[in-house]
Amino acid sequence: MMPEETGQQTAGEAARKPAAPAAGTTDRGPDAESPSPQPPGPPPHVNPLTPNVARMYDYFLGGNNSYPIDRETAERVLTQFPTLRIITRENRHTLIRVVQYLAAEEGVRQFIDIGSGLPTQRNVHEAAREVAPGARTVYVDYDPVVCLQAEALLADDPLTGVIEADLRDPDGILQHPVTSQLIDFERPVAVLLMAILHFIPDSDDPQGAVSRLVERLAPGSYLALSHASQEQQRDAGAREAAGEYRRATAQMVFRSRDQVTEFFRGLQFVEPGLVGIADWRNPEPPSAENATALLDTGFIGVARKA
Ligand SMILES: C[S@@+](CC[C@H](N)C(=O)[O-])C[C@H]1O[C@@H](n2cnc3c(N)ncnc32)[C@H](O)[C@@H]1O
């Protein structure tokens, strides 16, 4: 496949939504001091009165692409569960380590990053290309603002694409023209589901979506995912914090280690298996204090399709 066939125009069309506000225009948001309980007007992802999980995540990471309602909700979450800032940053660092491991050690050259989030930090395509300059990346998110911003960042990049799509509709991702143009499913692909599945309740069949994606992959492909957990429900603050997501664009679903393991059904874990968010091949493990705070708050695993 030629780089010029990579469908940037289509990606741009897919990501362009006239109703979406420009990303990062926090000054355009109405005063969130007086949020309405029933925000009128735009759909939740572009409504400046609805806490948005992508923008809250960006705030936890230290980014500045958020509305007041996102920052206020994020601050309430952090008051109840301060460890979340550490978790979020460790999760992002782990994502980069996973991508570079897969590119450098396993020779993966194709990445589908689903639930990619706002592209304000070091991103998957950058991390992959530091190791493998020709690596291709498809970013997928159901948030139109995320997609707009990703599209703006990647407009001139023939090896990347952006799709506005929902993980709950895996065929919509697999059959999207941008995916077809960038990804060769006859060759290994890494599907990245970092910090997304805990926004999908069992009633929406997240297992079915993961299985469908994996089914499409060639042998030698990989699934990497991280997931929030309250294995022993030991932290009341974390449960309270999760409650803050009730009014947000997505709600939090904690899953146990066994439930997270189940997403890797039929795959072979890469060492060290399913581990704590900061513990996956980390040359700079967290301090003892942070390690204690992080214990059982989330899991990360990478597994290979035989
Ligand atoms: C917490 S961020 C994670 C960002 C990035 N994957 C990371 O780990 O650094 C979760 C992202 O998943 C997206 N998301 C949540 N549910 C989704 C769904 N059903 N389909 C596609 N994207 C989804 C949100 O819009 C948000 O951008």
Image (cartoon, grey):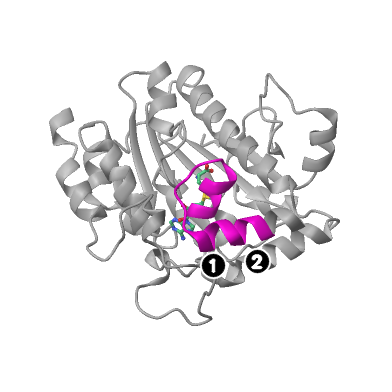
Task: Using a 10 Å C-alpha cutoff, classify the residue at mark 1 as few (fewer than 14 neighbours), some (14 to 19) or many (20 or more).
Answer: many
266 within the magenta span: no
43 shown above or below 119: below
User: Which residue matches tag 2?
Assistant: 244
Range drawn in magenta: 55-76
- Estimate the x, y position of residue 257 in percent, counting from the top left: 74, 50
- Estimate the x, y position of residue 196 in percent, counting from the top left: 53, 52
Q: Amino acid at mark 1?
A: Ala
42 shown above or below 294: below
Task: State the residue in front, 304 or 114.
Answer: 114
Asked if the residues shown at circle 2 and circle 1 are in contact, with their CB atoms under 8 angstroms apart, the answer is yes
As helix, strand or loop, the secondary structure at mark 1 comes to loop
Which quadrant: the N terminus? top left
User: Which residue matches tag 1?
Assistant: 248
57 left or right of 130 in image: right
Q: How many marks?
A: 2
- Estimate the x, y position of residue 214 in percent, counting from the top left: 46, 46
As helix, strand or loop, the secondary structure at mark 2 comes to helix
Q: Amino acid at mark 2?
A: Glu
